[in-house]
Image (cartoon, helix red, strand yellow):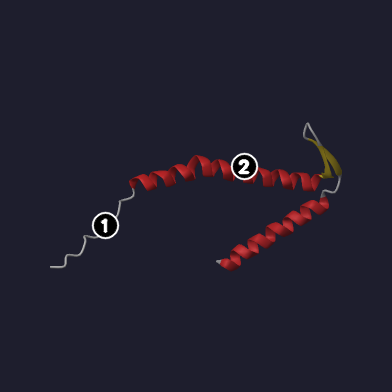
């Protein structure tokens, strides 16, 4: 399974490098207060990366944290062991 994951990672890295190499036209992205110069390939890859990170944050905040809180609330509390009696 590790080998398959590594091969997929290498495949996506190769795809990203190829995508960036084939889209070398210059582009300027205006962000209102500043501008960034780069290439079309880099801009598109960064936009996809930013979207993935944003989706991960939304998923974590909207689904994972509430489920963890629910699990904590519903988890049984372990009972403390009874004290030993020395007669």
Can you give x and y, in whole percent of width and height, for residue 9 in the image? 65, 60
Quarter of the N terminus within the rendering: bottom right
Sooner in the amino-acid sequence: mark 1 or mark 2: 2
Of residue 10 and residue 81, the one placed in the foreground of this image is: 81
Q: Is residue 54 left or right of residue 75?
A: right
Residue at x 57%, y 67% (from the top left corner): 2
Of residue 83 and residue 23, the one placed in the foreground of this image is: 83
Mark 1 lies on residue: 80
Residue at x 74%, y 54% (from the top left corner): 16
Marks 1 and 2 sit apart, C-alpha to C-alpha, by: 43 Å
- Badge 2 marks a residue whose secondary structure is helix
Can you give x and y, in whole percent of width and height, for residue 64 in the image? 48, 45
Corner quadrant of residue 86: bottom left
Q: Is residue 84 left or right of residue 11?
A: left
Q: Is residue 34 left or right of residue 52?
A: right
Q: Nearer the viewer, mark 1 or mark 2?
A: 1
- Badge 1 marks a residue whose secondary structure is loop
Corner quadrant of residue 67: top left
Crowd class of label 1 (few under 14; some 14 to 19; many from 20; radius 10 Å): few
* Up/down of 7 relative to 37, above or below: below
Return the mark for residue 41.
Answer: none
Crowd class of label 2 (few under 14; some 14 to 19; many from 20; radius 10 Å): few
Can you give x and y, in whole percent of width and height, for residue 53 in the image? 63, 46
Of residue 69 and residue 30, the one placed in the foreground of this image is: 69
Mark 2 lies on residue: 54
| Residue that extends furthest to the front in the rendered view of this protein | 87
Residue at x 79%, y 32% (from the top left corner): 33
Quarter of the C terminus within the rendering: bottom left
Of residue 82 and residue 73, the one placed in the foreground of this image is: 82
Residue at x 82%, y 54% (from the top left corner): 21
Can you give x and y, in whole percent of width and height, for residue 12 in the image? 68, 57
């Amino acid at each position: 399974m590790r080998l398959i994951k590594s091969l997929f990672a290498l495949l996506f890295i190769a795809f990203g490098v190829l995508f960036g190499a084939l889209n070398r036209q210059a582009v300027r992205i205006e962000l209102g207060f500043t501008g960034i110069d780069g290439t079309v390939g880099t801009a598109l890859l960064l936009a996809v990366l930013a979207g993935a990170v944003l989706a991960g944050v939304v998923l974590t905040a909207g689904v994972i944290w509430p489920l963890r809180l629910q699990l904590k609330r519903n988890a049984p509390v372990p009972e403390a062991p009874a004290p030993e009696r020395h007669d």
